[in-house]
Amino acid sequence: MRTRPLIASLLVLATAAAAAQMVAPVSARTPKRGGGLWLDVGAGYGHLRLTCVNCPTVVAANGRAVTVSAGYTPARNVLLGLQAQQWSSSGGSPGQRVSSIFAVVQWYPWPTTGFFMRAGNGIVRGPVGSQAAGAPSSSTEGTGVGFALGLGYDVKLSRRLGLTVQAATDIAALGDLTIGGQSAEDVIAYVTRLGVAVVLR
């Protein structure tokens, strides 16, 4: 007889818990996207454009872009971290490189899908060729502040491992530079890339 009140109390608690679970928002019942630390390593095609106020032509070159990103997941649809990228020229402009490191935020506007947007800002460093100012054969290193905008889509391979298709553009203001004795004013560098990354979350 003494167990009846206990059983009745347990039934009431179980019913209340079930009701609370039913009315809980979907976000509270949906597991976080990986959680904790995250890492992605990607590679693909990259295109560099250099412009300046007094440039007779736009300097452009094709190459390879490699990115490494890592950080922390503070919320189920937000990633915070650092992104390092290096673009290396190929073909007619061998030996040129543009490097950058950005603080980035990656946002999933629809958490149930793999689509995301990534943005960040930081430091960019790279060479500016002589074509930028019509100078004799020469180049100089420029360093400036840049920002990045990108889109991507995650494809899950397992609970923590996946692949991501990424497209992004990095834009950097390198300022006024002197190249081969000639002045290049307000040099702007654009690196556009399209690649695939391996993701661990």
Image (spheres, helix red, strand yellow):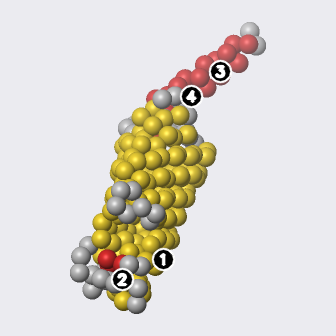
68 or 106: which is nearer to us? 68
Is residue 148 visible to the viewer in this orientation of the structure?
A: no
Amino acid at pointer 4 = Ala
Amino acid at pointer 1 = Glu
Query: How many residues crowd mark 1 within 10 Å: few (<14), some (14–19), many (20+)?
Result: some
Q: Which mark is residue 10?
A: 3
The image position of residue 117, as x and y in percent, is 38, 52
The image position of residue 48, as x and y in percent, is 35, 64
109 or 128: which is nearer to us? 128
- Whether residues under marks 3 and 1 lie with C-beta atoms below 8 angstroms apart, the answer is no
Q: For the residues marked 1 and 4, what is the alpha-carbon distance in whole angstroms?
A: 64 Å
Specify the farthest residue to the left. Answer: 56
- In the image: residue 172, left or right of residue 132: right
The image position of residue 189, as x and y in percent, is 37, 71
Disc 3 element: helix
Identify the residue under disc 2: 136
- Whether residues under marks 1 and 4 lie with C-beta atoms below 8 angstroms apart, the answer is no
Name which of mark 4 and mark 2 comes first in the sequence. 4
Name the image quarter holding the N terminus.
top right
Is residue 159 visible to the viewer in this orientation of the structure?
A: yes
Answer above or below: position of 109 versus 29.
Answer: below
Disc 2 element: loop
Query: How many residues crowd mark 3 within 10 Å: few (<14), some (14–19), many (20+)?
Result: few
100 or 78: which is nearer to us? 100
Name which of mark 3 and mark 1 comes first in the sequence. 3
Identify the residue under disc 1: 141
Q: For the residues marked 1 and 2, what is the alpha-carbon distance in whole angstroms?
A: 16 Å
Amino acid at pointer 2 = Pro
